[in-house]
Image (tube, helix red, strand yellow):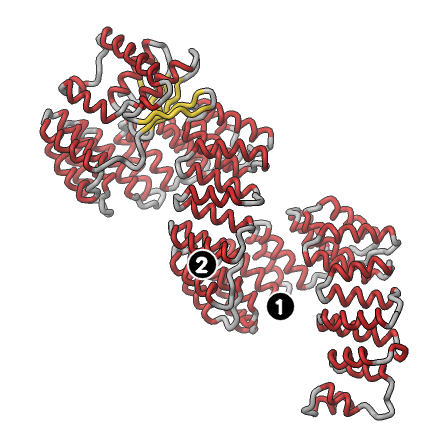
Amino acid sequence: MFLKSLKSSKTTPSAAVNQTISPQITNCNAKIRRFCEVGSLKEAVDTLCKSPKWDLELGTYCLVLQLCAERKSLRDGRRVHSVISSNSWQVDSVLGAKLVFMYVNCGDLATGREIFDQIANEKVYLWNILINEYAKVGNFGEGICLYHKMKEFGVVPNSYTFSCVLKCFSGLGFLEEGRKAHVRLLKLHLDTDTAVVNSLINFYFKCRRVNSAQKLFVKLLDRDIISWNSMISGFASNDLPEKGLEIFDQMLQAGLVPNLTTVTCVLAACADISVLEFGRMLHGYVLKTGFARDLTCNNTLLDMYAKCGDLDSAIQVFENMVDRSVVSCTSMIAAYAREGLSHAAIRLFHEMRDGALRPDAFTVSTVLNACASSNLLDNGKEVHDYVTENKMQSNVSICNALMDMYMKCGSIEDAQSVFSQMSARDTISWNTMIAGYSKNGRPNEALNLFLEMQHQSKPDCITMSCILPSCASLAALERGKEIHAHILRNGQIDDIYVANALVDMYMKCGALILAHLAFGMVARRDLISWTIMTAGYCLHGLANEAMSSFNEMRNEGIEPDENSFSSILYGCCHSGLLNEGRQFFTMMEKDCGIKPKLEHYTCMVDLLANAGRLTEAYRFIEKMPLKADAAVWGALLQGCRIHHNLKLAEKVAEHIFELEPDSKASYMRLANIYSEAKIWDKVKWLKDKIGHLGKEKNQVCSWIVVKGKVQIFFAGNVASHPESKNIETFLKKLKCRMNGENYIRSTKYAMMDKDEVEKEVALCGHSELSAMAFGLLNLSRGNTIRVTKNSRICRECHDMAKFISKTLGREIILRDSHRFHHFKDALCSCRG
């Protein structure tokens, strides 16, 4: 009757209660209970606070505390606790339990735990409440401590205890502890409880023990929707989304109706493997069931469309959302960035910044990635300002994203500044800086930072795959070997990225045998492994070995990609294998369905031009479906130089200068063609033009690693090196000896006037010769001289290297910007 009158009345619940309380009911306990029955918390607490302490009963306090807990009203709960204290009520096991429940449920875990420790309650549900709350807030260690403490107090855990503590074990990755709990619950005969088994399935999945989770699911007879959802999400989180979708299909066949959690899990699996059509079908189900009103479901839908590359549908979902969260906007920013629409991503970030939804750490990291991918340094600095203004610079993930952005935008000093100011660094911080140095042409700094990292953090597999390219860049073979030993000691050799980086390092250091041995140890070779070997053989001028590697890869069922074809065509160019090159070029589209890109056309032009088929090469360019760039025309210009076709060279040069009017390399190449034809006035005019173009951004230099230190020699400025006098004296003696033995030099120099030779020498700077000399002076016999140059070796230095290799009996390996040159007994691997 009371509830009926309350429903029909337009008055408030408290007023209704006051109207229905008869004058005879003066007992404050009854009045408070009536307020609690209708949910009038404020009136209940106010009445309790005003009531005489001797009139209040234990049950009344418990009832009000229960309502405070249900309403999560910590303020009212504290008022009640204050009344209990002022009224000198003893907090026994009953009242204490209610206080603990109220505080924990209202989010004040610390006070709840303090009261719990005082009452030493033996009620299992209270232990469960605390363990569960510790799991929720991520304080897994304390939850586990409480679980072990139960034994001391003789409290026997129930099914819910195990459900709670298993979350703690999985949160810390405590596999063995979780297994012991599994054994214990078997002894307590709780293994038939569906909720417990569901918790075990989740635990094993989170500890990446997929088989254990599957076995439990198979044995579980009474499966509920949570069981199926656990399997779907578990497979997805273990990089097995396909299996998650298979489980979903089995669930439908079993006649179960997907709930909101199911749909969210399946959409996430669709996103992982880009199953767009299936995702769209689920979207239809979402609209039909009304799940579209759920914010989490909408966010997952948006993310699914974005990861499947359907940006328009992602935008539509985003715009139709009634409520948006920071997660929604961050997902949209990531979607824009993924499609290369970085400006749109930044605009949305600005809208968030200026609106009600303030960007969080993940949003900031996402928009910084967008700035990095599009080289938007100024926008990245704006985001950095936002980080500083909102005091977010202590967040390690944000600092890592900032460093990555600065490195990818080429602002190395800004990245260094962020790194130096970090109060705490994780492995990602070190890896970001090492990778950034390596990619920005600062391999020496990368190696130095790696040494520093070893004293402060533990390098992981990503560190190894980042630092090895720096060894390769410097041709620092000994340092590379040391890192290889570190990889073996720490069991990192099974990582495919590390294994591939090792093979690449040995190849680029000129250690072919070691590269081959490292390749043989790669357990699961992928396309990248084979491409590295093929490209490495090509760089060393070993076309037959490269073709064997390419064919062996195909025989193992691994199909080549465009990079593989670039490598093999490049190798054919170096070895002048025109027919083989044509076969591979035809194979690309005919057999593998890969449309050639400009780099492939460049190789073909290079092959034709080097073979002397200049007219055919010119016609090939004219018939190309793509517009030729300066590299394509440059390959033909080089062929004109080799075969002394001045007329065609001038025609080709016009195309190049139209595309790149400030190309120093092309002007130099044309000047060399004129010098070989002894047209000195045009040579002078071109060299004057080169002089007016100013200095190159990247100065020509060569380097050699001796006793762990990188020695750099800049073209035309060798005198700046501390040992320049010794080097100069050594080279003069060698040149005198070379002239005395009437060593045959390149015909190019025989055709040029003496003054012109000197000019050519001055332009080259002979940095590679200085590096060779330094190695000869400082490395004992038996050690290979390994030199790297950031541009092509000049002909005079090439001749000198051949002479040194025979006269001094030293093996020299020189890597220039084009290929490797192995000098031994007056011969070079390039056959030049």
Locate residue 560 relative to residue 286 in the image: left or right: left
Callout 2 secondary element: helix
Question: Front-most of 406 and 547?
Answer: 406
| Pointer 2 local density, CA inside 10 Å: few below 14, some 14–19, many at least 20 | many
Locate residue 382 relative to residue 680 in the image: left or right: right
The extreme top residue here reads: 740
Locate residue 541 relative to residue 116 in the image: left or right: left
Quadrant location, the C terminus: top left
Instruction: Using the rendered image of the protein, determine whether residue 320 is visible from the camera's viewpoint.
Output: yes
Which sits earlier in the primary sequence, circle 2 or circle 1? 1
Q: How many marks?
A: 2
Residue 421: image x %, image y %?
Answer: 52, 44
Callout 1 secondary element: loop
| Pointer 1 local density, CA inside 10 Å: few below 14, some 14–19, many at least 20 | few
- Between circles 2 and 1, the one closer to the viewer is 2
The extreme front residue here reads: 86
Residue under the point 87% across and 77% down: 53
Residue 558: image x %, image y %?
Answer: 44, 39
Assess whether mark 1 and mark 2 are in contact (beta carbons under 8 angstroms).
no
Question: Front-most of 188 and 139?
Answer: 139
Which residue corresponds to mark 2?
A: 335
Tag 2: amino acid:
Ala
Residue 191: image x %, image y %?
Answer: 78, 55
Which residue corresponds to mark 1?
A: 257
Tag 1: amino acid:
Val
Residue under the point 24% across and 22% down: 795
Q: Is residue 358 above or below residue 649?
A: below
Quadrant location, the N terminus: bottom right
Residue 724 placement: quadrant: top left
